Amino acid sequence: MSSSDIFIGETTGTALLILLGGGVCAAVTLKRSKAQGAGWLSITFGWGFAVLTGAYVAGGVSGAHLNPAVTIGLAIEGGTKWSDVPLYLVSELLGAMIGAVLVWLAYLGQFQAHLTDPEIVGAQPAEEGLVDQKSAPAAGPVLGVFSTGPEIRHVVQNLLTEIIGTFVLLIAILTQGLNNNGDGLGPLGALITSLVVVGIGLSLGGPTGYAINPVRDLGPRIVHALLPLPNKGGSDWSYSWIPVVGPLIGGALAAGLYNVAFA
């Protein structure tokens, strides 16, 4: 597998993952969207189909990691060269940022309608007592389209939730077995993994929104901070490390267990 394969596959696959995953969040959240209020089931299945699409597109090119936790887990397991890890991570982050920009472009009118609605911009999370007034600006009214956030802000619980969810994802991927090239899952594995993502969302997504993927959260959060969105509010950087560190720990733990108990 060449460097160009890794870059093209991971950038394209991750961009599609975030476009469709962030797209369902936008559809359910934003004013003047036909799907507004469709609910949690729509979000969990939307993210599952997003994983499926990204994995099918990138699977034959780069192995379709689409997630630094998967990349680190496969490197620990031995299926990915450590020398390839930096390129995977950079490509995944770039793809996530591209996907977030595409969500914004697809929902330009809805973002404008949502962020100029007095009822929306007048309701700030800090007023509910869930955010420390002395910390960085609270999460804005459309940050949930781009990245995750906890329902109850508790560092240990939030971190454990992300560790546990990502552990489930990685152990499910690793125990399916890698394809003949040792670089990723085949088509059936991609389908199974997408269903696992739906299951994680339904069962474990409630506390934090289940990032289970560092770039799924960090890339779009960076884009949220940079985009010229009116009344967008803060990007909640005080929380941003949890959906990065938690999934990396969870992926590493799953790979360690796999090497000890399953390999």
Image (cartoon, rainbow, N blue to C red):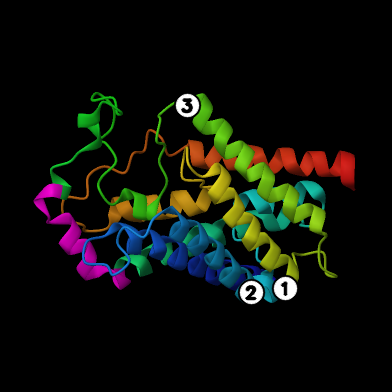
Amino acid under disc 1: Pro
Rate crowding at label 2 as few (under 14), some (14 to 19) or many (20 or more) other CA atoms within 10 Å. many
**Rendering quarter of residue 124:** top left
For marks 1 and 2, the one nearer the N-term is 2
- Which residues make up the magenta segment? 105-119
Identify the residue at image location x=64%, y=74%. Answer: 56
Answer yes or no: is residue 222 visible. Answer: no
For marks 3 and 2, the one nearer the N-term is 2
Residue receiving disc 3 = 155
Q: Is residue 185 left or right of residue 98?
A: right
Q: Main secondary structure of the magenta part?
A: helix
Q: Where the N terminus falls, by quadrant?
A: bottom right
Residue receiving disc 2 = 56
Amino acid under disc 2: Tyr
Mark 3 and mark 2: Cα distance apart in space? 35 Å
Residue receiving disc 1 = 187
Amino acid under disc 3: Val
Tag 3–tag 2 contact (CB < 8 Å)? no
Tag 1–tag 3 contact (CB < 8 Å)? no
Q: Front-most of 179 and 223? A: 179
Q: Under tag 3, what secondary structure?
A: helix
Identify the residue at image location x=58%, y=56%. Answer: 198
The answer to whether residue 110 is magenta is: yes
Mark 1 and mark 3: Cα distance apart in space? 37 Å
Q: Is residue 194 left or right of residue 108?
A: right
